[in-house]
Amino acid sequence: MSETYERTFGPVERLAVWLLLGSAFVVILNETVMGVALPVLMSDLGITAAAGQWLTTAFLLTMSVVIPITGMLIQRVRTRTLFGVAMTLFSIGTLLGAIASGFGLLLVARVVQASGTAIMMPLLMTTVVTLVPERQRGAIVGRIAIVMSVAPALGPTISGMVLQSLSWRWLFIIMLPIALIALVVGVLRMPNVGVTSKAPIDALSVVLSALAFGGLVYGLSAVGAAANGAAGINPLIPVGVGVVSLALFVWRQLSLQRTNRALLDLRTFQSRPFALSVILFVVSSMALFGSLILLPIYVQNVLGYAPLETGLVMLPGGLIMGLLGPIVGRIVDTRGPRIALIPGMTVTAIALWLMGLFTADTSIWMVLAVYLVLSIGLAGVFTPLFAVSLGSLPMHLASHGSATISTLQQVAGAAGTALFVTVMTLVSVSAAQEPGVAAIDALAQGTQAAFIIGGAIATVGIVIACFVRPATSPAAVSSATGDVQVIGE
């Protein structure tokens, strides 16, 4: 039985959104906690650095394969059920990680965790667009921006703090009770949003999606690993498979969407605000994840600080993004997205150009200040992008839009990481061969070059941001009456 409620943001809707926000923050946090723990894991489990990197690569791979499917799942599975599946998978993966006795089980744990994480973010974004009135959406979208940007940034900091006095297993033990509480509350109280359908699943689309996005993420991750001297498959092979599969996937979706059977409906790109926002999402995600991987390398290997100190340097940036997210959201609600988006993109570019001036003698306080500037810039970018992109789509495309954004963020994160690491490595290796250049100075030159490339990419983003217009919001509503359906018990 279903009841139709006036489109207001009442207690039931607030509970659903806050529960999804809290759960998404916890699951996304796990995406970056393994990086700082790698040296400890190598020692405890007797694995190489190349093997250890798979704990992060496998997480990204699983996310990129599962996320495209969630657009279809959200339309076919009740909200409460899908939330329960996501948090159950995450909880099982977290438990497996806590009790893992070897690398194999730990790798399985990360894959299971990522399966739940991949469902959570599109579910959160679609639910917000469905439940929250447009006049209040910016503030809530600001909180989504916190999850998408702050959680990955805090991962290395929290990991460093835990590992300072506890074993790596506590990275999982601490998360487990939080995940279980969210699971129980969600199963009992999560409302079912919208009306589910029973359209058949296209198996070929699922396979092509896995090959396309999985191949691209794996190949781009392998580029960075190869630049660091790690042995493995030629990155061009998975990238080539990914590109060809992506072309076939797009062709398949264009055919299926005529009968509303597409796994990922590409009619979302017919909305110009959505298409431009997605491009800026890619640019901003490359800047965020590229800096998240490169800045710790610079602080530890060039400036000589410990992992915990490195995490503390990055902590204020994560906090400032969290504080500014809701503020920027309220500004977007009242003044529109451009007032935050264009300055945000400009500040992001300036920060990356300033990072291109870092040397082996740069003060750690200067590093902290510039990273804060970068964080302020990104806080002004992600929130309006969410509001514009999802707010410009009709309700029946909202789940596909959120899945598209989440998927491309993973691909862009892998691309940003690969680009920054590859440029850093190539430049530093070349500089080290010059007479009289110390290894630290060579690495500093490598990080300079990578950040300059990031600054150039962000500068292109400024130009794109100037063309983004406010969404006319067809209305993330189900009809001209502005009502939304919340399915009863």
Image (tube, rainbow, N blue to C red):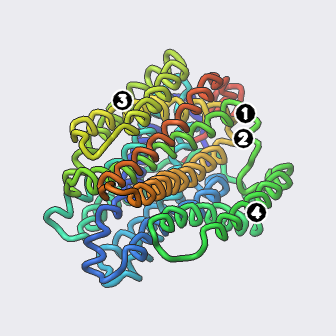
What is the CA distance from the residue labelled 3 to the residue labelled 1?
28 Å
* Secondary structure of residue under mark 2: helix
Q: Nearer the viewer, mark 1 or mark 4?
A: 4
Specify the amino acid type for callout 1: Ser
Please indicate, yes or no, whether residue 9 appears anywhere in the rendered image: no
> Looking at the picture, how far across and down is residue 354, in whole percent?
38, 33
Q: Is residue 461 left or right of residue 319?
A: right
In the image, is residue 337 above or below residue 284? above
Q: Nearer the viewer, mark 4 or mark 2?
A: 4
Using the image as rendered, state which of residue 133 and residue 265 is in the foreground.
265
Specify the amino acid type for callout 2: Thr
Q: Residues within 10 Å of mark 2 (few under 14, many from 20)?
A: many
Residue corresponding to mark 4? 244
Q: Residues within 10 Å of mark 3 (few under 14, many from 20)?
A: many
Identify the residue at image location x=25%, y=40%.
Answer: 362
What is the CA distance from the residue labelled 2 to the residue labelled 1?
6 Å
Residue corresponding to mark 3? 324
